[in-house]
Image (tube, rainbow, N blue to C red):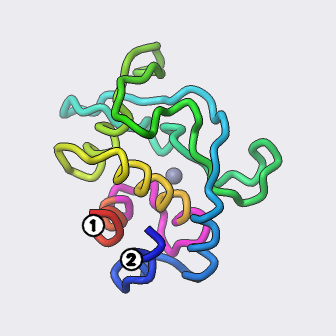
């Protein structure tokens, strides 16, 4: 992923590539709580607003400072069903598939899933646009991961 960040289509998303690469390299895990997903009108399951809870750059969470954190409640290695809140009720979801739906793909690999989520958080940290918008998340997917 660090190599992808240096390529111009991907690099144009971020303000300071060296700094972004450093942050991505330091990405870690923390328990960020239950995932929250909802069902869109077309039937696809997606993050509820921007707050699916896959990751965070929140500097206030657990007193980390501007660190990129992935939710340790997610099984990132395989696309397993995962318990979370669906329509505010407990249910089984596949976060990997949910993110694929978000970027208009039938599926994505676990590696792509993790890369996209780390880049999403890096975009919050040091990006020009808001990755919580579908437009920017799909551009990140296309320019950096796909
Ligand atoms: Zn976000």
- Dot 1: few (<14), some (14–19), or many (≥20) neighbours within 10 Å? few
Q: Secondary structure at mark 1?
A: helix
Q: Residue at x 56, y 46 (%)?
A: 55
Classify the position of the C terminus by image quarter: bottom left
Mark closest to the chain's N terminus, 2 or 1: 2
First to last magenta residue range? 123-137
* Residue 92 picture quarter: top left
Q: Residue furthest right?
A: 63
Is residue 79 depicted above or below 92 in this figure? below
- Dot 2: few (<14), some (14–19), or many (≥20) neighbours within 10 Å? many
Q: Residue furthest front?
A: 77
Q: Is residue 69 left or right of residue 129?
A: right
Identify the residue position indicated by label 2 in the image: 10
Q: Position of residue 103 (x, y in %)?
A: 27, 52
Q: Residue at x 36, y 27 (%)?
A: 80
Q: Which mark is residue 142?
A: 1
Q: Position of residue 75 (x, y in %)?
A: 46, 33
* Residue 61 picture quarter: top right
Q: Is residue 78 left or right of residue 62?
A: left
The CA span between labels 2 and 1 is: 9 Å
90 or 68, which lies in front? 68
121 or 136, which lies in front? 121
Is residue 104 depicted above or below 14 in this figure? above
Classify the position of the N terminus by image quarter: bottom left
Magenta run includes residue 74: no
Q: Position of residue 111 (x, y in %)?
A: 37, 51
């Amino acid at each position: 992923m660090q190599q992808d960040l240096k390529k111009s289509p991907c690099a144009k998303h971020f303000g300071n590539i060296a700094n972004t690469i450093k942050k991505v390299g330091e990405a870690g895990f923390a328990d960020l709580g239950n995932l929250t997903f909802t069902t869109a009108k077309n039937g696809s399951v997606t993050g509820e607003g921007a707050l699916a809870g896959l990751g965070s750059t929140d500097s206030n969470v657990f007193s980390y400072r501007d660190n990129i954190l992935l939710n340790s409640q997610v099984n990132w290695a395989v696309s397993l069903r995962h318990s979370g809140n669906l329509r505010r009720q407990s249910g089984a979801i596949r976060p990997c598939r949910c993110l694929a739906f978000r970027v208009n793909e039938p599926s994505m690999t676990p590696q792509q899933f993790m890369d996209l989520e780390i880049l999403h958080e890096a975009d919050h940290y040091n990006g020009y646009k808001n990755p919580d918008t579908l437009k920017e998340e799909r551009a990140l997917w296309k320019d950096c991961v796909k």
